[in-house]
Image (spheres, helix red, strand yellow):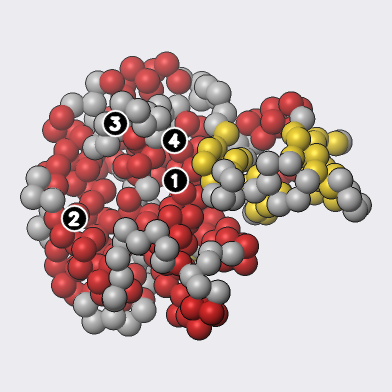
Amino acid sequence: MSWRTVVISTASKISLHRKNFLYSPLKGESISVPIEDISVIVLETHQVSITNALLSKIAELNIVLFSCDDKHTPNGVFLPFHQHSRYSLMAHLQTEWTKPFKKKMWQKIIIQKIKNQAYCLKYIKNENHKSIYNLSLHVKSGDSTNVESSSAKLYFEYLFAPFNRRDDEDWRNSALNYGYSLVRGAVARSLVSYGLIPSFGIHHCNQLNAFNLADDIIEPFRAFVDVVVYEMYVENIDKIAQRKQRFIKEDKNRLYGLFDVKVKIDNYHTTLLNACDTVASSLANATKSKEHEDIFLPSLDVDE
């Protein structure tokens, strides 16, 4: 099972050599790692060249490969091209999703998202977890009364008060957004690997968004990012203030550990990265069976 996260942050060339991932910096010695040990590669620097042989192997092994922008934030993910043996069948079935199916599916996703928010608060011993959990009991089909929005507003007040989710200068927002972008990419990779088209969403339907479905499926995963960011903030609050809220390399390195966070799904524990595959696989099955109940979603319940 793959387990390594590789971050390329210096000028270099990366290639495939004798079934190994070969990192060749412009200065210093080369490093070789078994390619099958790698689950995620992040290209933080723009000064990196990559061979086609390595790209092909990355697609074959379904490794998550992120590109980053000028601020070193993930802005793209490399997806395997039609690996699934029944890709055209899945595409056809996705276009046949009915409104009732999508509304019931979205209801289930939002219920689990809010439950995980409650479990996050419970994990950090915040008594307000009970009121958030109670909100999950009132989510209707399609979340027609927008309980998700009400829950989110209260949840972040309880988690980080005082806190403004729209403040781009706040370290907590930088960390949350970075973590969400990592998980979003992993979700997109899993969806494609099971033959699903990520632009065809359940709830999100922006014509300019190639990852509508990933933006649907990420929702119950967000609380896992929130827990890690909360712990990072509490542990380093003085240091963060001293560096004037700057989000630095050490913070990113900690967030790369998200892929290995323990997740409960389908009555067993696994890593977050593997849980993305489980959700995608079960969504493919639900699409075939036309039963929204067939999807499995991640749980953060600390008592399970």
Tell me which label, 3 or 1, sits earlier in the chain.
1
User: Residue 203's x, y, as percent?
Assistant: 24, 37
The x, y position of residue 179, in whole percent, is 47, 56
Badge 4 or badge 1: first in the primary sequence: 1
Distance Cα–Cα, label 3 vs label 1: 16 Å
Amino acid at circle 3 = Asn
- The residue that mark 2 highlights is 149
**Left or right: residue 148 compared with residue 185:** left
Element at label 4 = helix
What amino acid does circle 2 point to?
Answer: Ser
Crowd around label 1: few <14 · some 14–19 · many ≥20 (10 Å): many
Q: Earlier in the sequence, mark 3 or mark 4?
A: 4
Q: In this view, does 52 lie to the left or right of 238?
A: right
Residue highlighted by disc 4: 191
State which mark lies toward you, 3 or 1.
3
Q: Report how far apart the C-alphas of labels 3 and 4 lie in the structure.
A: 18 Å
